[in-house]
C-alpha cells in the first residue's frame, strides 16, 4: 500500500519547475533530465491534453415533462437555464433561489413520451377534457397541493404499467409535439454561451417495463441544423419502443441521416429490479445476449449515471459487505412505481460495481463488454432547479421544495399500504465533472464519449486518475502531475496500454483537491474489480491516501477521520481532513491472466445533510431515523485491464 500525505510532502517540494537548455533539452530543479525533453520552457504551452474540469448536470426536467408540470412545476427551459448559469429566479412555490456558483454546462432532458401534453392537460384542451382520465388529471393538477402530487404519482404509475390513455400520451405526429421540441431546441440555442455556459439539446427516453426503470438520457453534440431534423424517439409503439435495442437503432439512424453525433446515458438501475445490467435479454424471453448486443450497447452507452436525487448507485452493502462506505444513500425498496418489492437476487444487476463486473463476465463469453461505462452524476430534478448543495436543496418535485413538512412526508407506498419511500431519502443533486480542453459542446461531448469524466454527489472536488506501468511514488509530488499522467499512462475512462517491458503489475496515479467552498478530504481509495480464474466476480477496496496521519488497524482498516459537524448551526470545520490527497498505488495482487477494472473513490469528511439544515431553519424535531449528516464523495470513471491474446 502506498500512502502520500500532501500536507507534509508538498512543503518540501513546493514548485517543481523545469528549465530548458539552449539545445531544447530539459532539466529539472535537481539538474536531472526531465521526463519531457521535447517540451517548451513554459509548462502551460502546447499541452496536448484536457486541462480544465467543468461541472454540470446531464439530467434535468422542467414543467414540460408531464410528471413535473402535473406535480406543480411551472419553471420552463429558459427559467432553468437562467438558474443554472447563476441567475436568481423564483421557485415554483414562490421562493427566491440562487446557486452558490454557476454551473458550467447544462442538459435539459424533458421526457419524450407525452411531450407537450401537460400544457394541454392543465389548460383543459378539448381533446383532453373529452377523455375521462384526462379530465381527472386536469382537475387534480389545477387543484394543486397534495391533490396534484398524488395525481402526478398516479400518472407515473399509469405510464409505468401501460395504462395511460392514448389521448394524454402525445407522440410524434401530434402538432403540439413538434412545436414543443422546436422550442426546446430554440431555448438551448438562446442560452448556449461557448466558453462560459454551455447548453445541450437533449431528452429522456423513458422506458418502463411494468414499473422497472430502464430510462436513458439522449444527448446531442449537435445544434439545430442536425437535431432539428428529427423529433425524439419515444417508448410507445408503434412509433416508439421500450426496447433499448430499438433506441440504439434510432441513434444509428440519426447519425447516418444527419451526420450528427449522439449518445445515451442510462440511470437508476437501483429502480430497475434487476433489469439494468441483466445477464440475459429480457426483451427476448430471457435469451442469451449476442455479440451484436454487447458491441452496440458499448457503442452508444459509454456512460452511466451513478448518483442523482433518487439515491446513490455505486455499491450496495449486501454486495460489498467488506466496504464500510458502500451503504451511502441507498434506495432498495423496489422498482420505480413501487409496484414490486426488491429482492436480494435483483441487486447484482443494479449497481455500478457489480455492473462493471458483469460486463467483464459477458466480455469473456461474447468478446465485447456491454457494460463498459464511465461515471457521471446528475439531478433528475423535476422542478427546473438543479441544487447540489445541502444548504440550498429544493427537492425533486414541487411538493419537496423547502417547507417544514417535507422531511417527514411519505413519498411512496406499496399496494398494501406499507411505506416504500420517505421524502427524507431524496438526496441533493449529483454533478458530472468533465475534463475538457474548453467549455464548448464539442469539447465536453468528446470528453464524455472518451469517458474522461467523473461523478460527484454534489461537491466540486478536482480528481485526476491515471493508469500505467511505470508510475513512481515521486510522480505524485509533481505539480505537473497531469503531464506525468498522460505521458506515462492513460486517464480515467481508458484501457491500460500493453505492459511495459519488465513491468509486473499496473500502477495508478491519483490526486484529489477539495472543493474550494467545501469540506476537506478524508481519504482517496482505489476500487478494484476482477473476474477470478473460476469466473467469479471479485472486488477489493484499497486506501491509497488519507489525512491526519492515521494508521491502519490490525484488520488493515483505517480508523474514522473524525467528525466536526455542529448540528445546532448546522456547520462543520475543516480542522480535520486534508485539502488535497494523492499517491501512486501498484496492484499487489495482480494476475495478468484476469480481466480487471480500477476506479478512484474520494471521500470527504462528515458534513451536514439537507435534513439538518431543514431541522434548524424550520425549528423541527425530526424522528431519530432521519440521517442528519454524511460523507459526500466522487467516483472516477474506471480504467480497464484486458489480458493480451
Image: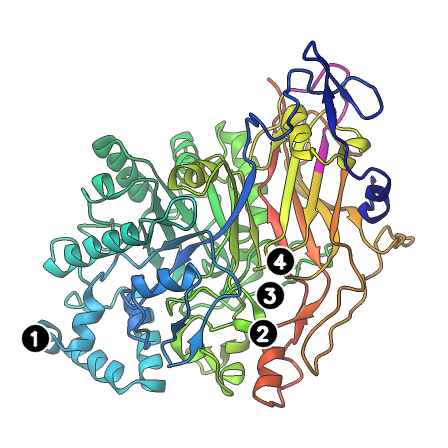
* Residue that numbered label 3 is attached to: 329
How many labels sit on residues? 4
Mark 2: secondary structure: helix
Mark 2 or mark 3, earlier in chain: 3
Q: CA distance from mark 3 to mark 4?
A: 10 Å
**On the rendered image, what quadrant is the C terminus found in?**
top right
Please state which of residues 558 and 14 is positioned toward the viewer in this rendering.
14
In the rendered image, is residue 601 in sight? yes
- Splitting the image into 4 quarters, where does residue 15 fall? top right
Q: Which mark is residue 562?
A: none
Label 2 neighbourhood size at 10 Å, few (<14), some (14-19), many (20+)?
A: many
Mark 1 or mark 4, earlier in chain: 1
Mark 3 or mark 4, earlier in chain: 4
Residue shown at 56% from the left, 60% from the top: 458
Foreground: disc 2 or disc 3: 2
**On the rendered image, what quadrant is the N terminus found in?**
top right
* Residue that numbered label 4 is attached to: 316
* Residue that numbered label 2 is attached to: 610
Foreground: disc 4 or disc 2: 2
Mark 1: secondary structure: helix
For the residues bearing labels 3 and 1, Cβ distance under 8 angstroms: no
Q: Is residue 225 left or right of residue 210?
A: left
From the top left corner, tell me how far across and down residue 288 is, in percent.
Answer: 43, 38
Mark 3 or mark 1, earlier in chain: 1
Amino acid at each position: 500500500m502506498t500512502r502520500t500525505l500532501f500536507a507534509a510532502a508538498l512543503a518540501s517540494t513546493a514548485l517543481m519547475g523545469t528549465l530548458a537548455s539552449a539545445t531544447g533539452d530539459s532539466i529539472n530543479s535537481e539538474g536531472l533530465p526531465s521526463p519531457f525533453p521535447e517540451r517548451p520552457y513554459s509548462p502551460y504551452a502546447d499541452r496536448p491534453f484536457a486541462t480544465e474540469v467543468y461541472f454540470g448536470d446531464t439530467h434535468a426536467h422542467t414543467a414540460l415533462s408531464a410528471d413535473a408540470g402535473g406535480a406543480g412545476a411551472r419553471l420552463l427551459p429558459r427559467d432553468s437555464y437562467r438558474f443554472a448559469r447563476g441567475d436568481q429566479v423564483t421557485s415554483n412555490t414562490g421562493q427566491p433561489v440562487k446557486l452558490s456558483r454557476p454551473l458550467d454546462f447544462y442538459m435539459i432532458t424533458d421526457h419524450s413520451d407525452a411531450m407537450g401534453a401537460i400544457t394541454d392537460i392543465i389548460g383543459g384542451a378539448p381533446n383532453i377534457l373529452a377523455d375521462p382520465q384526462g379530465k381527472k388529471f386536469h382537475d387534480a393538477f389545477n387543484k394543486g397541493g397534495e391533490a396534484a402530487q398524488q395525481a402526478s404519482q398516479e400518472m407515473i404509475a399509469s405510464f409505468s404499467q401501460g395504462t395511460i390513455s392514448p389521448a394524454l400520451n402525445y407522440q410524434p405526429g401530434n402538432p403540439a409535439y413538434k412545436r414543443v421540441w422546436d422550442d426546446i431546441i430554440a431555448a438551448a440555442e438562446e442560452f448556449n454561451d461557448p466558453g462560459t455556459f454551455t447548453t445541450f439539446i437533449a431528452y429522456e427516453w423513458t422506458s418502463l417495463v411494468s414499473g422497472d426503470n430502464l430510462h436513458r438520457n439522449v444527448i446531442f453534440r449537435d445544434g439545430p441544423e442536425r437535431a432539428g431534423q428529427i423529433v425524439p424517439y419515444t417508448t410507445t409503439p408503434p412509433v416508439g419502443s421500450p426496447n433499448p435495442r430499438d433506441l440504439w437503432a434510432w441513434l444509428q439512424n440519426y447519425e447516418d441521416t444527419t451526420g450528427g453525433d449522439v449518445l445515451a446515458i442510462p440511470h437508476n438501475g437501483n429502480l430497475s429490479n434487476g433489469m439494468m445490467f441483466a445477464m440475459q435479454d429480457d426483451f427476448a424471453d430471457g435469451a442469451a445476449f449476442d455479440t451484436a448486443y454487447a458491441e452496440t450497447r458499448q457503442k452508444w452507452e459509454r456512460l452511466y449515471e451513478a448518483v442523482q436525487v433518487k439515491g446513490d448507485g455505486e455499491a450496495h452493502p449486501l454486495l460489498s459487505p467488506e466496504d464500510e462506505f458502500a451503504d451511502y444513500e441507498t434506495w432498495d425498496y423496489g422498482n420505480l412505481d413501487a409496484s414490486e418489492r426488491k429482492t436480494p437476487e435483483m441487486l447484482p444487476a443494479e449497481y455500478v460495481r457489480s455492473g462493471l463486473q458483469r460486463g467483464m463476465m459477458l466480455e469473456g463469453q461474447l468478446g465485447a463488454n456491454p457494460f463498459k461505462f464511465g461515471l457521471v452524476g446528475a439531478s433528475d430534478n423535476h422542478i427546473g432547479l438543479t441544487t447540489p448543495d445541502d444548504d440550498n436543496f429544493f427537492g425533486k418535485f414541487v411538493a419537496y421544495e423547502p417547507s417544514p413538512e417535507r422531511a417527514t412526508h411519505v413519498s411512496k407506498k406499496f399496494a398494501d399500504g406499507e411505506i416504500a419511500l420517505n421524502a427524507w431519502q431524496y438526496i441533493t443533486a449529483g454533478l458530472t465533472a468533465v475534463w475538457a480542453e474548453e467549455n464548448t459542446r464539442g469539447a465536453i461531448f468528446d470528453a464524455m464519449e472518451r469517458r474522461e469524466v467523473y461523478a460527484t454527489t454534489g461537491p466540486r472536488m478536482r480528481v485526476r486518475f491515471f493508469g500505467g506501468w511505470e508510475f513512481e511514488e515521486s510522480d505524485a509530488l509533481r505539480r505537473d502531475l497531469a503531464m506525468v499522467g498522460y505521458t506515462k499512462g492513460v486517464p480515467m475512462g481508458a484501457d491500460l496500454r500493453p505492459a511495459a517491458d519488465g513491468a509486473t503489475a499496473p500502477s495508478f496515479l491519483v490526486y484529489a483537491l477539495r472543493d474550494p467552498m467545501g469540506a476537506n478530504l478524508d481519504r482517496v481509495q482505489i476500487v478494484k474489480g476482477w473476474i477470478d480464474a473460476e469466473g467469479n466476480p471479485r472486488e477489493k477496496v484499497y486506501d491509497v491516501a488519507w489525512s491526519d496521519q492515521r494508521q491502519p488497524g490490525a484488520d488493515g482498516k483505517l480508523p474514522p477521520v473524525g467528525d466536526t459537524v455542529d448540528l445546532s448551526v448546522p456547520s462543520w470545520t475543516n480542522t480535520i481532513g486534508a485539502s488535497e490527497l494523492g499517491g501512486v498505488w501498484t496492484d499487489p495482487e495482480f494476475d495478468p491472466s484476469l480481466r480487471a477494472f480500477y476506479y478512484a473513490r474520494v471521500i470527504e469528511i462528515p458534513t451536514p445533510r439537507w435534513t439538518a439544515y431543514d431541522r434548524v431553519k424550520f425549528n423541527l424535531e425530526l424522528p431519530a431515523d432521519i440521517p442528519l449528516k454524511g460523507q459526500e464523495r466522487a467516483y472516477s470513471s474506471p480504467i480497464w485491464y484486458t489480458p493480451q491474446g
